[in-house]
Amino acid sequence: MNWTKYQDIGIEAALKAGRMLRENMSSHREITYKGVVDLVTNFDSRSQDIILNHLSSFFPDHDFLAEEDPSERRRSEFRWIIDPIDGTTNFAHSFPVFCISIALEYQDNIAAGIIYDPMRDEIFSAVEGDGAHLNGSRIMVSRIDDLDKSLLATGFPYDLRKSRMNNIDHFINFIKQAQAVRRCGSAALDICYVACGRFDGFWEIKLKPWDVAAASLILSEAGGRASDFHGNPLNIFGIETLGSNGLIHKQMVEVLQSKKKV
Ligand code: IPD
Ligand code: CA
Ligand code: CA
């Protein structure tokens, strides 16, 4: 299958929504709380509407799995998996680190992935088997093979205050074994940054399929590796996400499996 046409239409949707978000960086946002710290803005739904309208005008029979949209599956072989703003807390605070994530799944396999960062005008993209690109130029993961010298990224789940499974134990272990650990607030961008060598590894728990679907393809097409915390192939519906340049993957699995809690 030639996925380029699908990718191009996905990029158009992401650019349209991203421009709208960028223009509204200083506009008033209506904030609704899904939980104590889990918020959503009126721009999440505006972004999603733009993306869904664009994609469904070309592909009316496809399925859509979008974060702010509860619609039922039609059982098409094609499903678009969409996060209309990944990094909503950042967007709500005018912290300019967020993106739009769009993946196309075909017969349960991710075929194309698009991540657009409207503040830097960076489009990360990949189609299966054709490498990963940043604004059209080929990207590759870093060559760092030592955790000691690695810059890592992570994030924390919204139920951090209530659940003991909150990633703080892993964070403490990694901060003592890596060169440094960042928490930027957009898992999709974090994984793209591993894909282009800005980070060497990333881990997080309790992510959703729309956080990781597009980014995991971009990472693997850039020569990286995506898995669960045991090194098994990544399940985008699973609870554990580990992504790396491949070279430090085993070392990261060892830290994630270590019983040492500091
Ligand atoms: C969140 C971001 C954040 C991660 C959270 C995600 P949202 O997505 O990716 O970096 O730590 O786990 O839920 O809510 O901004 O779309
Ligand atoms: Ca997200
Ligand atoms: Ca979101």
Image: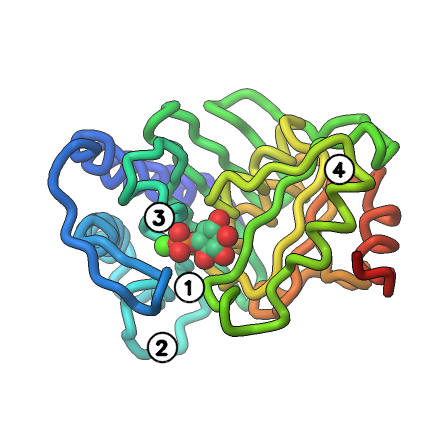
- Left or right: residue 38 compared with residue 128: left
Disc 4 residue crowd, few under 14, some 14–19, many 20+, Cα 10 Å: many
- Res 89 label: 3
According to the image, label 1 marks what residue? 79
Q: As shown in the figure, which amino acid type bears the numbered disc 3?
A: Thr
Judged by depth in the image, the label closer to the viewer, 3 or 1, is 3
Q: Of callouts 3 and 4, which one flags the residue occurring earlier in the amino acid sequence?
A: 3
According to the image, label 4 marks what residue? 245
Alpha-carbon span between mark 3 and mark 4 = 27 Å
Q: Is mark 3 within 8 Å of ligand 1?
A: yes
- For residue 2, above or below residue 211: above
- Residue 174 horizontal/vertical position (percent): 76, 46
- Res 73 label: 2
- In this picture the colour scheme is rainbow
Q: Are marks 1 and 4 in contact (CB under 8 Å)?
A: no
Judged by depth in the image, the label closer to the viewer, 2 or 3, is 3
Q: Of callouts 3 and 1, which one flags the residue occurring earlier in the amino acid sequence?
A: 1
Alpha-carbon span between mark 4 and mark 2 = 34 Å
Alpha-carbon span between mark 3 and mark 1 = 27 Å
Q: Of callouts 2 and 1, which one flags the residue occurring earlier in the amino acid sequence?
A: 2
Q: Of callouts 1 and 4, which one flags the residue occurring earlier in the amino acid sequence?
A: 1
Q: Are marks 2 and 3 in contact (CB under 8 Å)?
A: no
Q: Of callouts 4 and 2, which one flags the residue occurring earlier in the amino acid sequence?
A: 2
Give the secondary structure at mark 4.
loop
